[in-house]
Image: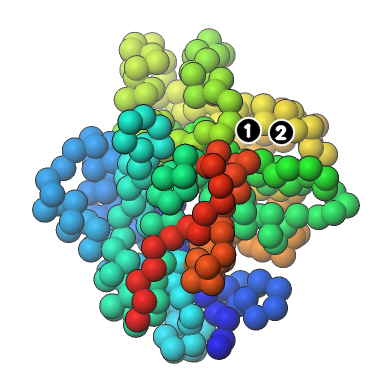
Amino acid sequence: MNELYIGIMSGTSMDAIDAVILDMNETPKVTHHVTIPFPKQLHADISQLINKAQTSLFNLGSLDVALANLYTVAINELLIKANISASDIRAIGCHGQTVFHQPEGTYRFSMQLGSGSYIAEKTAITTVTDFRNRDIAAGGQGAPLVPAFHQALLSDNNEDRLIINIGGISNCTWLPKNGEVSGFDIGPGNTLMDCWIKKCRNKPYDKDGQWAATGTFSEPLLNKLLKDEYFQKSAPKSSGREYFNLDWLELNEKTLFSKFKTEDIQATLLQLTACSIVDIINQYQSPYTYFCGGGVHNIQLIKQIDQLTDSTIVDINILGINPDQVEAAAFAWLAERCINNQTGTITSVTGAKHPVISGAVYFV
């Protein structure tokens, strides 16, 4: 059977949907990629659900199916671009859109939208979704899941490597040449900056960090934000927009809107992301740090990180994979692991009692 898999990822920021074909016949390799934008209304509806954490059952179900339909649009565009048919694909790995992540407490779960039933039915391709909850059931965080993919494809016996993904939430993977792999969610990547520019200027994101560059970050505010308990917490740990959002920001600084210029707040939020990432780079003392995710395009953010660390910043392209395709490729890889009854998690990353076969399968 042809070992071609599709991976779908929309990410915390919901800036777009990335879909890739991962060829697993030999060394895993991305052969084709498409990106489609989020429709504004769907973006707004899902954002409201995430921000309010309340909705009707009708709305929840409707968004689940609407997003699944959008994923199928991306899949069909990808098949057309690659000039192959659905029968050439063994399985789809779709992470779905996280709307709530609660890996601790009495009832632990992670909720993603994007119905696997609809994706499988509309594409006629076996579909794997719900990658997080089995790990949570085994006592883990259910995230991050990409470190296992990083280990499989990007580790090197001659070099310690630190991989930093800057999405809505930033996360890291430590790949030592000798020793145990580790990884966790660092904290806010783009999400706070995206929320703030949306609120103040009605823009989805701060292109190249241009607006942040017009401001001056507040050191007292930055220090206050960095004292948040999440940054002090030991790994394993994971987070999302249900924690890092505008409510979190206002809770930490009630006089935020009157005390600072809006562009200075944006500059401070950028510095918050930069400093939290640099703290991890310094913790691992990595000579080289490989970056991926949408945040690599924020010129001002990468510039600040570079100024704050002695580690050499490297585009992950040098390792043979496009920084915008890493996460989508990871879920294609996890789908392959799942349907072949192989574990796809690392206990030293998630904290689970044992590795698990991650994903729920909708066969066709």
**Quadrant position of residue 274:** top right
Where residue 286 sits: x, y (%)?
Answer: 79, 37
Number of disc labels: 2
The residue beneath circle 2 is 281
Which residue is located at x 56 percent, y 64 percent?
342
For mark 2, does the 10 Å Cα neighbourhood hold few (<14), some (14 to 19), or many (20 or more) residues? many
* Furthest-right residue in this view: 158
Q: Is residue 329 visible?
A: no
Foreground pick, 212 / 190: 190
In the structure shown, which secondary structural element does the residue marked by tag 1 occupy? helix
Image marks 2 and 1: residues in contact by CB distance under 8 Å: yes
Where residue 324 sits: x, y (%)?
Answer: 56, 58
Which residue is located at x 62 percent, y 58 percent?
149
Task: Name the disc covering residue 171, or none.
Answer: none
Foreground pick, 187 / 235: 235
**Residue 108 in the figure: left or right of residue 83:** left
Vertical relation: 288 (above or below) 324: above
In the structure shown, which secondary structural element does the residue marked by tag 2 occupy? helix
**Residue 14 in the figure: left or right of residue 165:** left
The kind of residue tagged 1 is Ile
**Quadrant position of residue 55:** top left
The kind of residue tagged 2 is Ile
Where residue 83 sits: x, y (%)?
Answer: 49, 89
The residue beneath circle 1 is 277
Foreground pick, 154 / 179: 179
Which image quarter is the C terminus in? bottom left
